[in-house]
Image (spheres, rainbow, N blue to C red):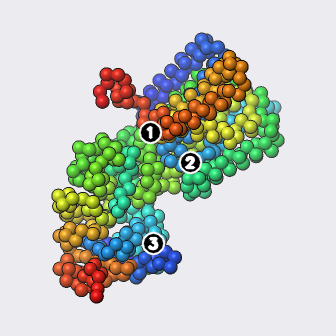
Amino acid sequence: MTALLATENLTIRFGGLTAVDGFNLAIQPGDLFGLIGPNGAGKTTVFNMITGVYLPSEGTVHFDGRLVNGLQPAQVAALGVSRTFQNIRLFDELSVLENAMTGAHQHAKINLFDSLLRTARHYREEQRQRDRAYELLRFMGLEDRAGLPAKQLPYGHRRKLEIARALATEPKLICLDEPAAGMNTGEKAELSALIRKIRDELKVTVLLIEHDMKLVMGICEKIQVLDYGKTIALGTPQEIQNNPKVIEAYLGGE
Amino acid sequence: MLKTLGILAAGIAVAFGFGLLVDNAVPPFWALIVNLCGVSIILAVSLNVINGLTGQFSLGHAGFMAIGAYVSAYFTTTLRYFDPEVAKYVSQQPLFDGVWGFAPALLVGGLAAALAGLLVGIPTLRLKGDYLAIATLGFGEIVAILLTNFKQVGGSKGLTGIPSYADTSWIYAFVAICIAFSLFFQRSTFGRALIAIRENELAAEVMGIRTARMKVMAFVYGAFFAGLAGGLYAHLFQTINPGNFNFMKSVEVVVMLVLGGLGSLTGAIVGAIILTVLPEALRDLEREIALPGFRMALYALILILMMIFRPQGIFGQRELSLKLLRRILPGGRK
């Protein structure tokens, strides 16, 4: 089976600092894949290269058999890669529903004149986006907040709304950047179930960056560990937990 | 679509009724102010799409206005008298003569401004914040300088003898069209995309919104209506010169937006009316107390106080709606 997402020798340098160094990753369709590592290991930088935000200094990113390097973020999104952000980036002045609707914007097949003249196509498109957005808000348990401005949402809900918005782009792969950060135990349990449902029910492949080991070990089937920009381990949760290099990276060696 | 045409027809009908009222019941000086308010509203509402919704700081609106004014005026004056053959032909075409020649001339002016918006927008909209402001400011200055040195359109003396086609009815018909279209723009997938760019450009881009394309779209839309406003302005005052469209004009429109509330359509309308009427209203006051220059000082003071006590503008980013009215009126539901 060919990988849905594959990076080869992915490297990026910021001046003298090599943030990610020769990073290889292979994610199969249907994976629930964890990418972990201590702070500053380069995990978010990997996401930024996958989604077209940063251009790698070396190496390649292939998604669905197509070369992604050099594409604009919007073009990568059109291929079916979506993501959330570690520091939440919602559209604060838009409502919860409208935030989710913006995810569906890229599939709009109307032009500005349809909207200015309020043609039937315009109303169909609005309906399509609204239906899609409500469906995902319901999925994330946010539908009763649909009318609220996004800035008024409590923290945990903001993280969920970002996921709903990313899912509205109808991705094949969703990259979640520390979705559980700042959540309490109850919220984390709920989130674990949701992430599993994204993969099992929506059939979206999941790539997860997360610091909460209990959550990662609980839901991911494969885990790759990054430290100082390099892969130090790859395997099942059990293998990772017993890997001496991982233990050293997290707890420090002698 | 039928509903839209209905709304537009109703808006134009109201504009013509308003025109009749102003023509017959308002003294000429104040009628002129009312007309000028209309032009200002179109300018402010269209700039709001760029500066308010998309969050791009453009200082070039007077440049687009100038292009629309000159192109449409050129069509209704010079072009008609340029060649006797052309003049004769044109006068036989009912659609291009008299007041009915005005609509196509305006349209051509608007399209010329939109084209300029496209050409200027594609390279400059890569710039952000102050840099974009400076680039668009430069564009406005270039237009003014070109017009000053362009003998065909009268150089620094400008164009005169422009027919006075733009009466209250015409101006407010276009005000209605501009407001309706801008509202429809704002409340569509494109409007949400623009707001998304303003709120978080990186997230918008990653969610698949073609930010560069959307920004150019907003810019071209704004430029088109600025061009229309310019055409109306030219056929209201019957004489235009490059000085009418200098840097201060662009700043004036930005101030209207900031006063009304950047990002609010109603705010843009209210800001445009206040900043057009206020200097004239204060003129009477100035005469009363015999203190020349007092007018501009007070005008400035009002703006400064506004920025201190309500920096988000009168409306903030809200719109005047029934819901808002219900909330602020006494006895309303919270």
Q: Quadrant of residue A166?
A: bottom left
Q: Quadrant of residue A224?
A: bottom left
In depth, the one of B91 and A27 nearer the eye is A27
In depth, the one of B302 and A208 nearer the eye is B302
Q: Which residue is mark 3?
A: A69
Q: Is residue A37 above or below residue A206?
A: below
Cβ atoms at labels 1 and 2 below 8 Å apart: no
View extreme (bottom): residue = A254
Left or right, A85 with reference to B265: left
At label 3, counting other C-alpha atoms closer than 10 Å, the crowd grade (few under 14, some 14-19, many 20 or more) is: many
Query: x%, y% of residue A124?
Result: 35, 43
Q: Which residue is mark 1?
A: B317
Judge whether residue A81 can be spotted in this image. Answer: yes
Give the numbered dot on residue B57: 2
Judge whether residue A117 can be spotted in this image. Answer: no
Question: Mark 2 belongs to which subunit?
Answer: B
In space, the residues marked 1 and 2 are separated at their CA atoms by 16 Å
Query: x%, y% of residue A51?
Result: 40, 66
Identity of the residue drawn at 47% across and 78% down: A17
Amino acid marked by disc 3: Asn
Q: Earlier in the sequence, mark 1 or mark 2?
A: 2
